Image: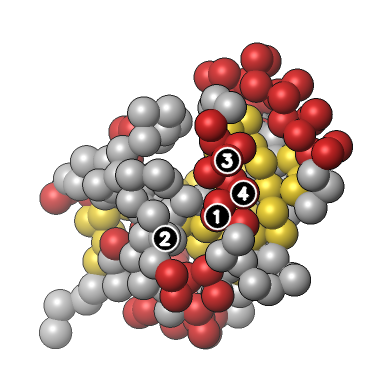
Amino acid sequence: MKEISYPIKESFYSIQGEGHYYGIAAYFIRFEGCNIKCHWCDTKESWKIKREDFISIHRIIANINNYQVKTVIITGGEPAMWNLSPLIKKLKKKGYRVHIETSGAYPIKEKYMDWITISPKKTKLPLQENYKKVNELKIVISNDNDFLFAEEQATYIKSTNCFLFLQPEWGNIFSILPKIISYIKKNPKWRISLQIHKMLKIP
């Protein structure tokens, strides 16, 4: 039987630069494929699926084993487009902590996940069922209207254990960051998420 494989744009060992777990060492697996295609996306090169980029689960695990890592972060693109269960089961069996970063627009089998970050997109909203599973809601802010979108998205979060983050869009950071700081002061349920890895130029 042919082994399951996935289209992987890149995988690398680095530092998580944003959100609740910023600052930790983690191994990143960036999936190819995304039909949401946000205009401000900083990984547009991951949208296209290339046949030659498919990698077997065995090879993915072997690459991770080269590093002293405890946390594996699955990102994209939009990783939830794919059936991740076979990969995540293998990762959990190996003892890794598994995080996923997704738009929430596709089903998430949360029993295999240790941490779920949903970053909703206006053009393809999260499935209602996923709001019940999220550990971290992260809204990218690029203009004033995005604050209204953030508040709307927060109304769907019922868990008091979910962290709410506002993250400035990187290409607009200097104009929007002061507004985010002011907004959080007035609405302290939110936290700020900065892309520290970009600021420090961490590869």
At label 4, the amino acid type is Glu
Residue 184 visible in the shown view: yes
Residue that sits furthest to the top in the current view: 175
Whether label 1 touches label 4, CB < 8 Å: yes
Left or right: where 85 falls relative to 100:
left
- Give the x, y percent position of residue 72: 56, 62
Is residue 180 toward the left or the right of residue 150 in the image?
right
Circles 1, 2 touching at the beta carbon (< 8 Å): yes
Q: In what element is the residue under mark 4?
A: helix
> Circle 2 is placed at which residue position?
126
| Residue that label 4 marks | 151
Secondary structure of the residue carrying numbered label 1? helix
State yes or no: discs 4 and 3 in contact (Cβ < 8 Å).
yes
- The kind of secondary structure element at disc 2 is loop
Q: Which mark is residue 148?
A: 3
Q: Which residue is mark 1?
A: 153
In the rendered view, would you say 38 is above or below 7?
A: above
Q: Nearer the viewer, residue 1 or 43?
A: 43
Indicate the position of residue 66 as horizontal and vertical percent values: 54, 59
Is 1 rendered above or below residue 25? below
- Marks 1 and 4, how far apart at CA: 5 Å
Quarter the N terminus occupies: bottom left
Q: Is residue 101 above or below residue 123?
A: below
Q: Secondary structure at mark 3?
A: helix
Q: Position of residue 181 (x, y in %)?
A: 79, 30
